[in-house]
Image: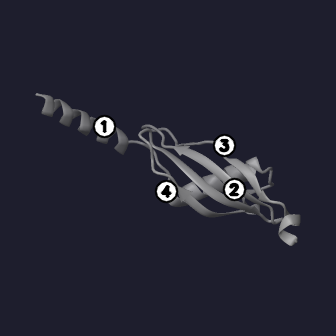
Amino acid sequence: MKKQTLFGAMVFGATLLAGCATLTPIQTSQAIRSQTAKVLKLASPQEVTISRRTSKQVDAFGSHDYTYTATTKSGDVYHCTIEIIVGLVEEAPNVKTPVCTPAASKSANAQ
């Protein structure tokens, strides 16, 4: 009886996760770039380049934590983190506001 209950719970969990809304890699990149441009108060996402993006392991709730480097057209460099949580059935994924800190000042790089 315990095996049937466990199997039923596993099937239910897999079915629930299959219905979760996730982003494609391109959509993820666009969301990260768009949110980063907002945080850095840029006119558009085209004013920032995202590089060195890495993802931590997905947690039990479907949360993806990304770390990346954002470089503006003016040459400012930031180290950023952002969290993207998968949406439940028929809900869009939740893209949190990124946290960005300046990597180094331009004057320090020039010396």
Q: Amino acid at mark 1?
A: Gly
Mark 4 vs 3, N-terminal side: 4
- Give the CA distance from mark 4 to mark 1: 22 Å
Query: Image quadrant for the C terminus?
Result: bottom right
In the rendered image, which residue does mark 4 sit on? 24
- Give the CA distance from mark 3 to mark 1: 29 Å
Mark 4 vs 1, N-terminal side: 1
In the rendered image, which residue does mark 1 sit on? 13
Disc 4 crowd, CA 10 A, few/some/many (<14, 14-19, 20+): few
Task: Report the front residue among 108 and 3.
Answer: 108
User: Which secondary structure, mark 1?
Assistant: helix
Q: Is residue 83 left or right of residue 77?
A: left
Disc 1 crowd, CA 10 A, few/some/many (<14, 14-19, 20+): few
Q: Is residue 63 left or right of residue 104?
A: left
In the rendered image, which residue does mark 2 sit on? 79
Tell me the number on the disc at residue 97. Answer: 3
The residue that appears at 69% across and 56% down in the rendered structure is 79
Nearer the observer: mark 1 or 2; the answer is 2
Q: Position of residue 36 (x, y in %)?
A: 70, 52
Q: Amino acid at mark 3?
A: Thr
- Give the CA distance from mark 3 to mark 2: 14 Å
Disc 2 crowd, CA 10 A, few/some/many (<14, 14-19, 20+): some
Q: Are marks 4 and 2 in contact (CB under 8 Å)?
A: no
The residue that appears at 54% across and 48% down in the rendered structure is 65
Q: Are marks 4 and 3 in contact (CB under 8 Å)?
A: no
